[in-house]
Amino acid sequence: MSTNFPLLLTGLALLAACGGPSKQEKQEAQANTPAQTVETPVADSVKLPAPYASKSVTHRVDIVPWPAGKTPVAPAGFTVAEYAGRFDSPRWMYVAPNGDVLVAEASTIPMTMTKKVAAELKLDKSRSLRDHSANRITLLRDTDHDGRPDVRTTFLAGLSQPFGMLILGNNFYVANTDGVLRFPYQAGATKITGPGQRILELPKGGYNNHWTRNLLASADGAKIYVTVGSGSNVQEHGPENEVRRANILQINPDGTGEKIYASGLRNPIGLHWQPGTQKLWAVVNERDELGDELVPDYFTSVKEGGFYGWPYSYYGQNEEPRRKNERPDLVKKAVVPDVPLGAHVAALGLAFYDKDAFPAKYRNGAFIGEHGSWNRSQYSGYKVVFVPFANGKPSGPPEDFLTGFLAGGDSKEAYGRPVGVATLPDGSLLVADDAADRIWRVSAAR
């Protein structure tokens, strides 16, 4: 299935550039393709520019504190408030069956960084990159149901860049960057006390923020899906660096039976089952350094056995100029994604809205957290968008839902960067802001 939407002019929020095209590659691409918008073999109304139609730029924000009393902005009829703060890069959230909110606190660690690069990234001013990772999971519990947690404990510590979390039966799973761990778990527990077991080894780290590994169980609990992003921008380090990467893996709950469920997904992060169906959906970060409007991140249904292009093509059969003529067989079979989100928006979070507290238009639609661009001349992303669904399919382009993270105008300042999104049992929406070290709660006004 492909949905025909206009391409939104937006961009990715990864944190460091590498693997750019050579001067010769740029000259060849510019000589062979005009520097204007051209028709491409994707969805009929999606028009993509030629590669290198605009320069690849590095344009980062400076993170500053949220002004007193200021919050992100939701549409009329919604209220935004701080749910919890004082975290150390709260990147991902998982809502347990009993309503507990588990928060993975982890961040990119610039292990090899010259003084020049550190100065460029303004590490003394910006918290976009940190010199450490908290490597813990914090539990939040709202016992009096007033919209703010009154219990807060360290659920699990001593991890290695944790991200995805999952409760399945009497087990708690966490996806470190280098493997999946399983721990004994009892409903209502406020911390993990038993020893863990590594049930699956994973390739460690990756390009920019591709260290994140997400987890999702099948409805019957028989399978677990694991996301593994690419180790590079566009396979510039060779295919041997990409073994088991740029994939969604499928395993049994004990870690056995690994298989590649879908491939060619440069950095799949958000995973969710579409309500009322057995259809898997994902949001995917696409590649850098082809210009302001390439390549659009996307939101797509995931076909078992499907190949989604990386690194040989993008958004269907659009051939990657840096991998030209290497695998025409794979380019030919690349699946066209369902919904373009715009180039460089850094789409990360994903939650289908299966509650009924919000107005009817939001039911069964999808909320997507966009961390924000670094590889685009005008900032894009830095917001949460909503994709409406009707009759089981996307029924319109992404629309802004939670904004105000950018200072606006000509300013380079941002107050925060949204990442993970999750729904609470009461129907409100949580949004993790890993730059401001807090979690926001969006509720429908009563």
Image: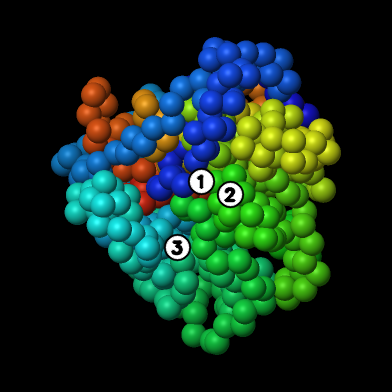
Nearer to the camera, 40 or 160: 40
Vertical comparison of 87 with 318: above or below: below
Nearer to the camera, 129 or 187: 129
Residue type at the position of mark 3: Ala
State the image coordinates of residue 179 (x, y, percent, origin top left). 60, 71
Q: CA distance from mark 1 to mark 3?
A: 29 Å
Please report contact status of discs 2 and 3: CB closer than 8 Å, yes or no: no
> Label 2 belongs to which residue?
236
Residue type at the position of mark 1: Gly
Question: Does residue 317 appear in the picture of this structure?
Answer: yes
> Quarter of the image holding residue 216?
bottom right
The residue lying at 43 percent from left, 26 percent from top is 55
The residue lying at 66 percent from left, 68 percent from top is 168
Question: Does residue 362 appear in the picture of this structure?
Answer: no
Residue type at the position of mark 2: Glu
> Label 3 belongs to which residue?
104
Q: Earlier in the sequence, mark 2 or mark 3?
A: 3
Residue density around tag 3, few if under 14, some if 14–19, many if 20 or more, within 10 Å:
many
Q: Earlier in the sequence, mark 1 or mark 3?
A: 1
Q: Which of the labelled discs sits on residue 19, or is there none?
A: 1
Q: Which of the labelled discs sits on residue 4, or is there none?
A: none
